[in-house]
Structure formats: structure tokens, C-alpha cells
Amino acid sequence: MQRGKGMKFVGDSRIKAEGKMPNVPKDYSEYPGKTEAFWPNFLLKEWMIGAIFLIGYLIITVAHPSPLERQADPTDTTYIPVPDWYFLFMYQLLKYEFASGPYNVIGAIVIPGLAVGALMLVPFMDTSKERRPFKRPLPTGFMLLAFAAIFYLTYESVVNHDWEKAKAQGAIREEVQFDPDSEGYQIYAGSSCISCHGGEFEGGLGPTLVNTGLTADEIIDIAHNGIGTMPANQWTGSEEDLQVLAEFLESLKSE
């Protein structure tokens, strides 16, 4: 085919009329640190960080599994439940007078609702495209305030809670076989001991009486002189009954 002044164009079916460029991300080298291609640059970074945190979380989970406690007993009024660590700040908030008792609604609904609502409104209150924190005082201030409140309340909850007592209360009980019709148990059930040490010697206000390793004479001495938080002179029965009870408690062994 001849066009123009003697110019010739030769067609070749092996060459596409309109060549398509491969799916290559744009070159952002002219804008260092400001933007980058979502695929694969940004997404790959996100995946790598996510994988690092996931692997670390799995390692911690395997190394420190969640501790199990004994089966819940609704009749045990001495047990003090505690939420997981990420809710301790709410647990502490409900201890204050302005957020507990008759004002429980304030501590459980109003204050958390205001905090969550404020954080949700921050993106709409500050539409700046600036990425530096000190250039965005409103959202930065809200986040710092929320972090300080959560940190302080969590710290107060941890330092003011008796973790040793809670651990003892939640410990899995050792089951022991005993004869409820025996003379030793009848003396135990009729004494003040059962109110602190439980109907099945599981413990409550006092420690468990199973596998104590104490001899009958040592148990008698504790009944008279006390030990730890147990005051002296708690036994009000006869010495003969105390001897029977001490020998019975000495024989309590878990299977």
C-alpha cells in the first residue's frame, strides 16, 4: 500500500497494532517517602509485619498456656472473679464510688460509651492529610489520653489485687475420698472449721485440708495456737473430739 509522496508502510501480522504495556506498578521514585505502589510494596510489608506478630503470639501461647481454674461453684461466695488482663482497666473503674453501686450505669455504659464515641468521631473532626503526630493535635491528644487512662487503671487494678489469694481460690481442687458418716467428719461438720475450709475440705477462707502433710499433734497445736491468718483458740470443743478430728484430718489424702 502506497501513501503520500513515495512512502510505503509494510504490515506484519506478528506485530500488534496497539501494544499493551505489562502490569507494572508506576515509578514512584520521584516521590520518596510519600507514596508507593499498593501491590506488591505496601501489601508485602503489611503481610510481613502481620506474620511476625502472629508467629510471636503463637510462641507465647505455646510457652505460657492459659491456666485452668477449678470448676465454677455458685455456692462459693468467697471466690472473687477477675477479668482477663485486657479488661482490668474496666474492672478497676467499677471500684470507684462515682462508677459503682447505684452509679453502675455510669461506669459500665456512660463512661465507656463516651470514650468509644469520642475515638470514633476523631477522624471526622480532623480531616487533615498530615501524617506527623505533632501536626495533628486533636487525634494525638485523644489517643494519648485514652492510653494514659487505660494504663493507669490497669496498673491500679494489678497492684491492688491479692493475686496469691486469687490463685489459691481458683486452684483445681484435689478430690479426696472420705466417709461422711465417720466420727471424725461428724465432729468436723459440727465445728466452725467447715465454714472456712469447706464441706469437702476444698478450702475457702482457709486453705485446703487435703494433703497437708501435718501430723495429728501439729493439727492440734494449730487449733490451739493458730497459724498465719488463722487466729488462736479457734477450737471450742473437748480435747477428746479434737484428737479424733486431728487424726481424721491427718488421714485425708487425695488419690
Image (cartoon, helix red, strand yellow):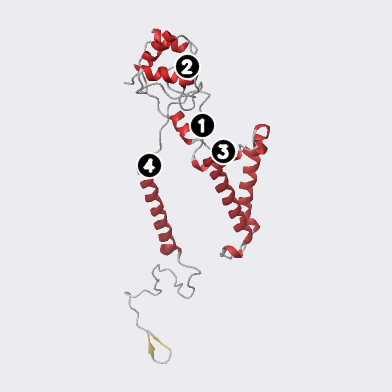
In x, y percent, where is residue 188? 44, 13
Rendered location of residue 251, percent (x, y): 34, 16
Q: Is residue 111 visible?
A: yes
Label 3 packing within 10 angstroms: few (<14), some (14-19), many (20+): some
Q: Is residue 170 above or below residue 115?
A: above
| 209 with respect to 90 (left or right) | left
| Residue carrying label 1 | 81
Measured along the vertical axis of the image, is residue 3 above or below residue 204?
Answer: below
Question: With 147 as the anchor, is 212 left or right in this view?
Answer: left
Secondary structure of residue under mark 2: helix
Q: Which residue is mark 2?
A: 194
At mark 1, the secondary structure is loop
| Residue found 57% across the figure and 47% down from its top | 152
Tell me the distance, in whole angstroms, between the alpha carbons under discs 2 and 1.
22 Å
Circle 2: residue type: Ile
Mark number, residue 64: 4
* Foreground pick, 213 / 253: 213
**Kind of residue sitting beneath label 4:** His
| Marks 4 and 3, how far apart at CA | 24 Å
Q: Which residue is mark 3?
A: 91
**Dots 4 and 2: beta carbons under 8 Å?**
no
Asked if residue 74 is positioned above or below residue 29 in the image, the reply reads above
Marked residue nearer the N-terminal end (1 or 4)? 4
Which of pointers 2 and 1 indicates the residue nearer the eye?
A: 2
- Ranked by sequence position, the earlier of labels 4 and 2 is 4
